[in-house]
Image (cartoon, grey):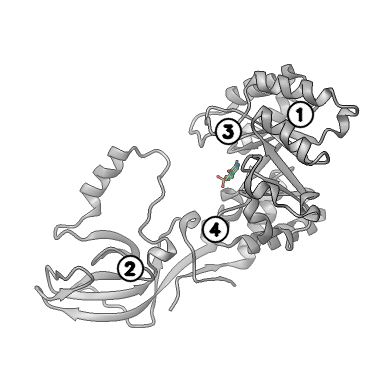
Amino acid sequence: MSLTLTVDGERWRHHLLTTVTRFPGIVPVAKGNGYGLTLGRLARRAQWLAEHADETGAPLDVLAVGTYDEIGEVASRYDGDLLVLTPWRPFGAALQLDARTAARVVHTVSRPEDLAALRAHDPDARFVLEQLTSMRRHGMTRRDLAGAAEALLAGTDSRRSGLRGVAMHLPLNTTSHLSEVSRLINDIVASGLPTRTVFVSHLTHDELTRLAATYPDFTVRPRIGTDLWLGDRGALSVRATVLDVHDVERGEVFGYRGRSVPKAGHLVVVSGGTAHGIGLEAPTGDQSLRARAATLARGGLDAVGFVRSPFSIDGKQRLFAEPPHMQASMLFVPSGARVPRVGEQIEVRVRFTATDFDRVVID
Ligand SMILES: *Cc1c(COP(=O)(O)O)cnc(C)c1O
């Protein structure tokens, strides 16, 4: 009935422990759809990792969430600090935290005016300052950081300023980030900010090791989501259920659009549709729009105009008979191929960060 993500629990947990051991100071990221696993599950797992600190040698004292609205899903399942990645603004959900949760939150501040506003709103607020990177999403320039340092050091007790570090969000580069990070760290030093902790994303293990050697007085804390939760793809399998099969002759009409079948075969109705995120592709790493269009033109359509689907039967990727429906999809299987039986499970290739499964089963 369902679109199901099945996790090989032992293998997954082993990967989590190994990753946390390998990246001391890791800040696990649990945001969005929980990387397909749900936020609640990731929060419980982060708590479990924190409780295994003896084994990993890595205390896990902070979990990152994407937005203020996600705090509710994780706060009761994980009991450490909660770093919110979306920068604080003087409006909206950021102002609606209850006092108990607020005490556990570490805010991200990305504009000078927000630093003043946050400290006025909550004098005990803890925060990281986000530094502008080549991503150019959010963040402070070197001049902003120097201004922030001045504002913080002007306080009566600058060590109680609430500053927990500087955060930088780096692009998913193929080449090395090191020169950019070095420049950014030099800007932190030059700014006079009273911190030696930086939170980074998307650095390789090798890059982190080299940074630690170059800046021994800095603590570099990697924020990791994908490589933690989804880093061992072999531990994860996604399956849809075959719900119906209809034999069709060439010319027979089917589907929402009354299309006629271009050749004899079978319509196979499977679980999984737009509501699950099936067929909606997020942009991929390095493909330009033109390259993606070319791919679609070349390989995405078959000779009779069917679009390739993410569903496979017997290891062969099958075509959508028409665009996915809300919770089911219609596939076309040509005559001659083995026809799956109703109830059978078939493989689906999904983008985990854009998929909502009906069920997640941890074996
Ligand atoms: C999502 C996110 C991360 C984690 O990214 P992954 O690619 O999933 O490891 C780190 N930092 C920020 C600011 C993010 O938004």
Q: Which residue is mark 1?
A: 218
Q: Tag 3's secondary structure?
A: loop
Mark earlier in primary sequence (2, 1): 1
* Residue at 67%, 29% in the rendered image: 113
Q: Amino acid at mark 4?
A: Asn
Q: Quadrant of residue 158?
A: top right
Instruction: Judge whether residue 111 can be spotted in this image.
Output: yes
**Residue 88 position within the rendered picture, expressed as x and y whole percent measured from the top left:** 66, 40
Closer-to-camera residue (211/80)? 80
Q: Which residue is mark 2?
A: 325
* Residue at 68%, 33% in the rendered image: 114
Mark earlier in primary sequence (2, 4): 4
Q: Which-is-in-front pick, marks 4 and 1?
A: 4
Label 1 neighbour load within 10 Å: few <14, some 14-19, many 20+: some
Question: What is the C-alpha distance between the residues marked 2 and 4?
Answer: 21 Å
Mark earlier in primary sequence (3, 4): 4
Instruction: Judge whether residue 198 can be spotted in this image.
Output: no
The circle on residue 138 is 3
Q: Is residue 100 left or right of residue 231?
A: right
Label 2 neighbour load within 10 Å: few <14, some 14-19, many 20+: some
Mark earlier in primary sequence (4, 1): 4
